[in-house]
Amino acid sequence: MSNFSVAFRNADAATILAVCGELDAHTAPELESAIKKCRDEGKINLIINGHDLDYISSAGLGVFMAFIEEIRTLGGDIKICALRSKIFDVFDLLGFPKIYHIVETEEEALSLFERGIQPIPGD
Amino acid sequence: MGGVGEAALMSTNILYQAALVLCFLCLWITIAQALENSRPTPAQIFWHVILTIIPACLLIILILQIPGAFLEENIPAAPIVHVKSALLSVVLAGLSFILMQRFGHLVRFRRTRRSERNWYLLLFFFSLSSVISAPFHHHFEDLSSNIDATLSIFLLLALVTSVIFIFLNTVRLAWIIRLPVKRKMGALGLGIVSVCFTVATLLLLFSPDVLALNSITDLSRPFEFLVFYSLPLTAIIVLCITFGFAYALTSVLSLIFHLPTIGDYQRSVDEMAAIQALTVLVREVADPEKLYHWVVSTPVESGRGKAAWLTIQDLESGSLKPQIVAAHNIEASLADKVCDVSAIHGESAGTRALVSIQNTAADRRIQNGKSNGILSLLAIPLVTRTEVLGTLFVSRDVAHAFENEDIESIGIFASQATLVLENARLLESKIERERLASELAIARGVQQRLLPQAMPRFDTLSLAASSTPAHEVGGDYYDLLELGDGKLAFIVADVSGKGTSAAFYMAEMQGIFQAVAQIAPSPHDFLCHVNNALGRSLEKNVFVTAIYGILDCNTGAISIARAGHPPVAFVDVNGNAMLLRSGGLGIGLDRGDLFGQTLEVKEHVFNPGDLIALYTDGVTESRNSEGEEFGYDHLLQCLQSSRYERAQGVHDAVRQTVDKFMGSEKKYDDDLTLLIIKWHGPEPVISINHAQNNPLL
């Protein structure tokens, strides 16, 4: 029934999680366990590719918040890329771009990791 | 004698017999109808038979006391002999009919088509024998034609067939098996008495000598009177009483042969009764402890096992180790010590099949089985359609003690017990659900009271608001507070997520608003304060979005800040609509200084006719059946078109439009809150108090 999925892909600088479908209170645990899995495997440079994300609810946004502090303490980061404009609006309304790197393309996100650029709060 | 005379005699005889047959057929029908509706037990049937035979025999003996006998065969010594014959015939016919009817009940117990056929064939051949014997009446020696030779053969055949059917019907003893042991004993006693009495009746019929009545009866036996009265009737009577005797005899013999197996049968009856009791129990007892106790005590009490215990995997407590929840005839702690309950439970649950350990000495999962009386052990998983509830252990103090039949029986019991336990569990969860539902209803009432019960009233502006949770309780919040100096603080907030956890944060939000709004001089201070206070208690993945504003009700000056919340919708009197989107993070996103740094405050002064709408995403994200969202454009359009109304009218228009948009299957996915503030400006006629404070005048 779940119309949500996460696909893993490894790049040199980061692990890419391509999310697809609707991320709401029911499907949020899937993304949560996916990020948990990466963290447990020591993959702390994560890129969430939201190209195929159709919908995100507040519970879905909560998943990013749940891990960001810990991942950053470990020296990694979660960067978000390729959001559709409607989805980006949801992130933007809440002020996510002030806290997360939200970029247009996966390559951009990868290059941020390659260059070791951490988000500057309030940037 | 001439042929004509003989024929006349024959026809008279036949007419006489026909009349008799009709009379006695009536008697048969009367008796059948009298006994038809009763459904007696086997013991009652024997009892009735005895109670019928005793007075009948006494009557026969009494009738025999009447003087008068036969000089020689069929030649009466006195006219009284006719009366005597008739009386004897009626009594004996009545007795034999009652016997037939009564035993017929037993023969046809749990009837099948075959048994019905045999029974009616028995009656048919009895009647046939009787009919064929009719021409022989009073003519044992007189007739010597060759017809008689053929008839004799037919009569013989009919009689032999009757005897065969007597045999076939006497072995119909289905009632014995189902009889409980006490009733069996009772039936046996009464059966023996019935046999004795039927024998006595037969003896009385043929030779009353045994009863030492020879001196009185003038050497005539009752049989002779019967034959004298009617030969066909005699045939029926003798056959019926013979059948009665034979049936009573086979019943008694069969009961005696069944005695050794009564114990086994009783045990399975007890087991079935126990299962029955268990199913009744589940309707009355909600306490699982009692059910567990029943589950373990039944196999022991039915004699299938020496001790029994039950393990349940309690997933709610988070422990995977099965716990012994009940034990019978053994201490739970001892059972746990002697046998590795987890390992055996694991095997039975894993394979979903019974584990049979016929000699525990050879199994490493059982320690010191011999000294603790556990030498054979069965472990039966209690398997439902979806899961394994637990495992029932049954042990015996002898190795190789469980026969296939025991295993089968305990298996059947276990599957019944599973049903019962699952039912109890479902019942419990239903009760739990109902309890939760009523708690939630209470919570909803509490939460509704956290929202303003009435809108404050002002001359310069109108207000309208509503909040509808998607579930019983929600995470939306709106409130208004008069701060003094004609200032009004207002807030609309949305806790991420839905349901109970969101409702708790919403309540916290209300407390903070009521306390902090009074002392915070600006929306910026207020929201920073909220971020600090809530940041400590919010879970990591939960945030709150809010819009907070302060409106000067005298001047129309408004300052407003947005913390991650959907933008304020603004419409002026000319119909210009816009979204006021100032910067600001959601509450809880950042617990440091970033929140305050990014939070913008917008200032504005209302013109008469301006209105703002504060709402939660439940409004803009409402979806119709095609999955389309209501969106900002719809909202702004709706506000524009209803902008001349007072706040309540605008509010109602928006809610109605949203409902209409969602269509017939209106079901809110998210909590939905809407607050409309409309500025009318100072009235032409105003109070003196206001006039002094209003710088515009």
Image (cartoon, grey):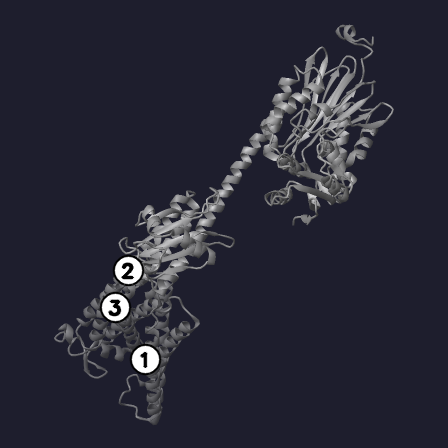
Most distant residue in the front direction:
A115
Q: Earlier along the polypeptide chain: callout 3 or callout 2?
A: 3
> Where does the image place residue B188, in percent across and percent down from the top left?
25, 65
- For marks 1 and 2, give the CA distance: 52 Å
Question: Residue B192 shows which numbered tag?
Answer: none
Examine the rendered structure and indicate whether residue B428 appears above or below residue B74: above
Q: Which tag is nearer the camera, tag 3 or tag 2?
A: 2
Tag 2, which chain?
B
Marks 3, 2 in one chain: yes
The residue positioned 65% from the left and 14% from the top of the image is B519
List the residue tagged with mark 2. Answer: B398
Tag 1, which chain?
B
Q: Earlier along the polypeptide chain: callout 1 or callout 2?
A: 1
Tag 3, which chain?
B
In the image, taking residue A122 as reference, residue B376 lies left or right, namely: left
In the image, taking residue B491 as reference, residue B41 lies left or right, namely: left
Q: Earlier along the polypeptide chain: callout 1 or callout 3?
A: 1
Q: Which tag is nearer the camera, tag 1 or tag 3?
A: 3
User: Are the residues tagged 1 and 3 within 8 Å (C-beta)?
Assistant: no
Instruction: Say which quadrant the C terminus of chain B sits in.
Output: top right
Question: Residue B256 shows which numbered tag?
Answer: 3
Give the image quarter of residue A78.
Answer: top right
Residue type at tag 3: Ile
> Where does the image place residue B551, in percent across and percent down from the top left?
75, 17
Looking at the rendered structure, the secondary structure element under dot 3 is helix
Around disc 1, counting alpha carbons within 10 Å, would you say few (fewer than 14), some (14 to 19), or many (20 or more)? some
- For marks 1 and 3, give the CA distance: 24 Å
